[in-house]
Image (cartoon, rainbow, N blue to C red):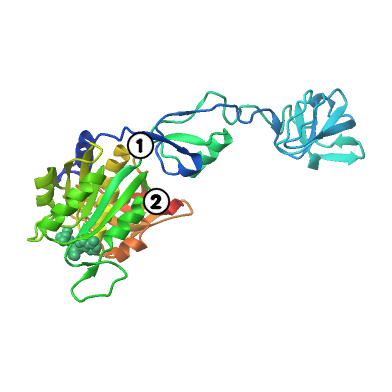
Amino acid sequence: MDVCVQPGLVPVHEAIVRMLGELAPIAATEIIALHDSLDRVLAEPVVAPINVPGADNSAMDGYALRKQDCNDALTLIGESFAGHPFTGELRAGQAVRIMTGALVPAGADTVVMQENVTRHEQHIRIHQVPELGENIRRVGEDIAQHMQVLAQGQRVTALDIGLLASLGIAQVSVVQRVKIALLTTGDELLAPGTTYQAGKIYDSNRPLLQALLTRMPVEVLDLGIVPDNPAALRAAFTHAREFADLVISTGGVSVGDADYTKDILAELGEINFWKIAMKPGKPFAFGVLGNNARAQQCWFCGLPGNPVSTAVTYHQLVVPALRFLAGEAPGDAPVITAIAAHPLKKQPGRMDFQRGIFSGVNGVNSVASAGIQSSGVLSSMSKANCYIRLPAERGHIAAGETVDVILFDQFIR
Ligand code: AMP
Ligand code: MG
């Protein structure tokens, strides 16, 4: 349990547990082409229909032979190319020229790489006697037929696509995409690309969330900027609910006079409004908006308006909820430790997600602050490559202390 959490604030992990306790994963599945399956969630385990490799084959360009004959001169009796195997059987004193990926001929038990052989016309001599079975890739050594290669609930990666292709699989069964309706709220917001007006700001949250969501198994309906006015918000959320499994909005969830979002959500659905023990990103609204057009429950996550708070609450709260909705198996982002390169300011009471610059050079993990830590300052977040996650109870961090780091995902692309 967190100690030192400010009274009335919900710890981050508790907010996640409470959300997952209410959400129901999407049950509908579909069969799609393998090449469309990147980042989709598998609805069923995948079992290997064949052995990979399908037969013993050569790992090198060289000569296939019997290990026991290696001390003698050998006679070449043919060739085995990838896709064009040697069809005869090799006997004592014989060798077959063989290429990488070509089938090992019957009778051969070893492949000698060509660098270790001298050839004179149809005869070879071996300089370096190989181990028995050397340079042979065995049938089923990568994947044995009937073995489970991927589990239900796994999100398909590029490497998984390669793996499934190696099994001859061209279609996969996946959970249907989560339908998201996205909107930002605020009378001050201008769409990027429109003329700047004094007193207004450009809407950074929607492009930011759209970009983050491209990595998720979702389909996004963009409802644009909604003004701070109850009728407009009511109309937008009513429209969003028709389409969506999950509505994501930003702004209007704090305590200002124009913060209507949570009132409208409470009017249309059932709202859990929490002040989360995290910094940035304290106010967060979660709940159900009623049923969508498919008679499924439509959920919502109301994120705070400051762009850094939007990004942090998206990563820490919306992503776990979305993974669960999408049928993905549970799994947290890996946490690594690093040495604070300099002191970090921290008040006890909330879990901090400071934006940092991590470096792992010569085996030393260290992390520095990415700059101004205010929740309105997106420039330092754009410079950052990680969160420095500091538990609620911790106070100021001295240089050289160990801290937890969670790398942003673009780090390994
Ligand atoms: P709010 O949560 O609506 O009170 O907004 C908090 C702060 O975030 C205010 O300074 C807003 O102007 C700003 N903000 C709200 N929405 C956005 C947005 N979509 N893009 C950039 N800044 C925003
Ligand atoms: Mg606002």
Let me know if residue 401 appears in the view: no
Q: Residue furthest left?
A: 257
Mark 1 element type: loop
* Residues under numbered marks 2 and 1 in contact, where contact means CB atoms less than 8 Å apart: no
**Residue 233 on image: x %, y %:** 15, 55
From the Cβ of disc 1, is ligand 1 less than 8 Å away?
no
Residue under the image location 46 percent in, 35 percent down:
172
First in sequence, mark 2 or 1: give its number.
1
Q: Is residue 310 left or right of residue 75?
A: left
Quadrant location of ligand 2? bottom left
Quarter holding the N terminus is top left
Name the amino acid type tagged 1.
Glu
Residue under the image location 61 percent in, 30 percent down:
52
Gap in Å between the C-alphas at discs 2 and 1?
17 Å
Residue hosting label 2? 409
Name the amino acid type tagged 2.
Asp
Question: Does 370 sit above or below residue 94?
Answer: below
Residue hosting label 1? 328
